[in-house]
Image (cartoon, rainbow, N blue to C red):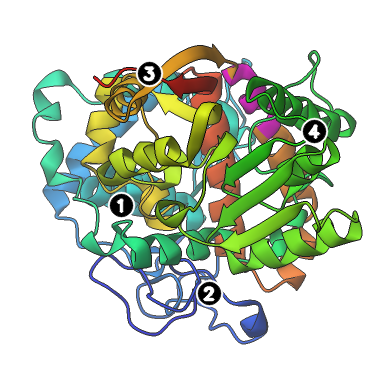
């Protein structure tokens, strides 16, 4: 995410970096835009914004006064109805335990929402135009009432404030490589700043609650071991892993005696995974390949893929399940871990460019259980087991967010500016809210050969 050319969607297209995110080498070279000064600035902005890296955060959209007024009316009523309205800075706080949202720049906040809906809501947070002492709490309340925020007659006009997903984000082979690199190749050190020492970037399974920081590594191993057991991985198993991460699952499978081939499109992850595998003395049992899942070779006794389908994109789900099926030896087992959402919500999201798809996971889409069932069956796979544990993901994300915010000095030293840090905190809180509100779930599934649909 260096800068050169900005697309019509406000992204920067560069080699391997996500839209708008500063490279480490430019940590001291950013152009600061102070509150109320410079082109596109406005009173009340609290965050300095580099307009070259964050064009759609630095400038306010040209929303008409009518749209801004409608947004102010609708948003104001919704926040009041949900008791999320907070007083202006310096005024006494409302009594009660409800999380609240504090507006520092109401005009900018409403203009962004009037023009870009939920993308504008997130960009307003990135710009420092609103805050909350309980960000995840505010977002959870909004997620719980997401279907009620806009009056029914106006929902038919959602095309006025949403846009289609960029064609450039399609997960062709080249597009998938770019999309993966724009998130996972940000910096291994960045991910180390909020993940536990296992470097596992997916939901843990805790032995019990409350979930504590010191229990996260064990909870990640518990999750991995459940998947390995589900797939029947043991001594001599030929295992294919689609989505290497930083290698923890491959390490634990190899320690059981499995022969592991693990695929990734992230050069940063592959390099560190290889280092970790070599350090454990298991490089004779694990091969890390920089390879697209569509190009997987060989037949395997077990296939495991953890939170990978979300990055595939709906257009390529048939290819994904066909690749799983082709990779499976007779009698083999496939263990998947996947985030899911309701089917109707998935269909709406699939047709919409969202804040997450713009800034965090370009080209990604969370599937529904129905979509997984239909596409897997069409590929000749049968679902044998399906277990959900969304509450565990909410706790995992809380621990990640707390560690990230506690390591701001480290993140800054890596070259990630305040806008990025607010973006990442919003992403983690936004995701946590999805699981707390049950808008999202996470499932572990076992698939085997079955009759074609």
Estimate how packed mark 4 is, as few (under 14), some (14 to 19) or many (20 or more) residues with alpha carbons within 10 Å: few
Q: Quadrant of the C terminus?
A: top left
Q: Is residue 333 above or below residue 49?
A: above
Write down the residue under mark 1: 112
Q: Determine which quarter of the picture holds residue 154.
A: top left
Q: Is residue 321 above or below residue 47?
A: above
Chain-order first, disc 2 or disc 4: 2
* Furthest residue in direction front, as rendered: 330
Give the secondary structure at mark 1. Answer: helix
Mark 1 against mark 4, which lies toward the viewer? 4
In primary-sequence order, the first of circles 3 and 2 is 2
Q: Earlier in the sequence, mark 3 or mark 4?
A: 4
Marking on residue 34: 2
Q: Do labels 3 and 4 touch, CB within 8 Å?
A: no
388 relative position to 236: left or right? left
Say which of marks 3 and 1 sits in front. 3
Residue at 12% across, 45% down: 160
Q: Is residue 59 left or right of residue 181?
A: left
Q: Is residue 86 visible?
A: no
Dot 3: what SS?
Answer: loop
Say the numbered circle drawn on residue 450: 3
Say what secondary structure mark 4 lies in: loop
């Amino acid at each position: 995410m260096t800068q050169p050319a900005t697309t019509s969607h406000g992204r920067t297209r560069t080699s391997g970096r996500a839209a708008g995110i500063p490279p480490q080498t430019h940590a001291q070279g950013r152009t600061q835009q102070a509150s109320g000064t410079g082109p596109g600035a406005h009173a009340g902005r609290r965050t300095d914004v580099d307009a070259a890296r964050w064009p759609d955060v630095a400038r306010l959209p040209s929303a008409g006064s009518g749209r801004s007024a409608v947004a102010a009316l609708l948003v104001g009523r919704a926040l009041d109805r949900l008791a999320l309205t907070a007083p202006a800075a310096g005024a006494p706080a409302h009594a009660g335990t409800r999380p609240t949202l504090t507006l520092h720049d109401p005009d900018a906040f409403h203009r962004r929402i009037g023009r870009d809906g939920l993308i504008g809501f997130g960009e307003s947070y990135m710009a420092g135009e609103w805050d909350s002492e309980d960000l995840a709490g505010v977002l959870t309340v909004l997620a719980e009432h997401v279907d009620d925020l806009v009056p029914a007659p106006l929902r038919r006009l959602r095309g006025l404030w949403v846009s289609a997903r960029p064609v450039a984000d399609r997960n062709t082979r080249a597009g998938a490589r770019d999309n993966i690199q724009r998130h996972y190749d940000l910096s291994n050190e960045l991910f180390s700043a909020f993940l536990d020492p296992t470097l596992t970037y997916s939901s843990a399974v805790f032995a019990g609650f409350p979930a504590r920081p010191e229990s996260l590594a064990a909870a990640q191993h518990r999750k991995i071991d459940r998947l390995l057991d589900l797939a029947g991985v043991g001594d001599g198993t030929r295992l294919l892993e689609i989505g290497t991460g930083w290698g923890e699952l491959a390490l634990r499978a190899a320690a059981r005696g499995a022969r592991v081939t693990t695929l990734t499109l992230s050069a940063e992850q592959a390099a560190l995974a290889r280092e970790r595998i070599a350090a454990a003395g298991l490089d004779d049992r694990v091969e890390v390949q920089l390879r697209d899942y569509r190009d997987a070779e060989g037949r395997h006794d077990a296939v495991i893929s953890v939170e990978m389908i979300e990055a595939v994109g709906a257009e390529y789900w048939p290819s994904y399940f066909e690749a799983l099926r082709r990779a499976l030896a007779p009698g083999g087992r496939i263990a998947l871990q996947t985030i899911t959402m309701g089917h109707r919500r998935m269909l709406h999201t699939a047709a919409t460019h969202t804040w997450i798809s713009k800034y965090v996971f370009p080209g990604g889409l969370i599937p529904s259980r129905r979509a997984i069932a239909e596409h897997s069956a069409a590929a000749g796979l049968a679902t044998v087991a399906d277990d959900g544990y969304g509450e565990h993901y909410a706790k995992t994300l809380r621990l990640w967010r707390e560690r990230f915010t506690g390591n701001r000095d480290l993140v800054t030293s890596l070259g990630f500016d305040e806008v990025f840090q607010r973006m990442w905190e919003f992403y983690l809180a936004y995701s946590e809210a999805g699981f707390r509100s049950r808008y999202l779930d996470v499932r572990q599934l076992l698939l085997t050969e079955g009759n074609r649909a």
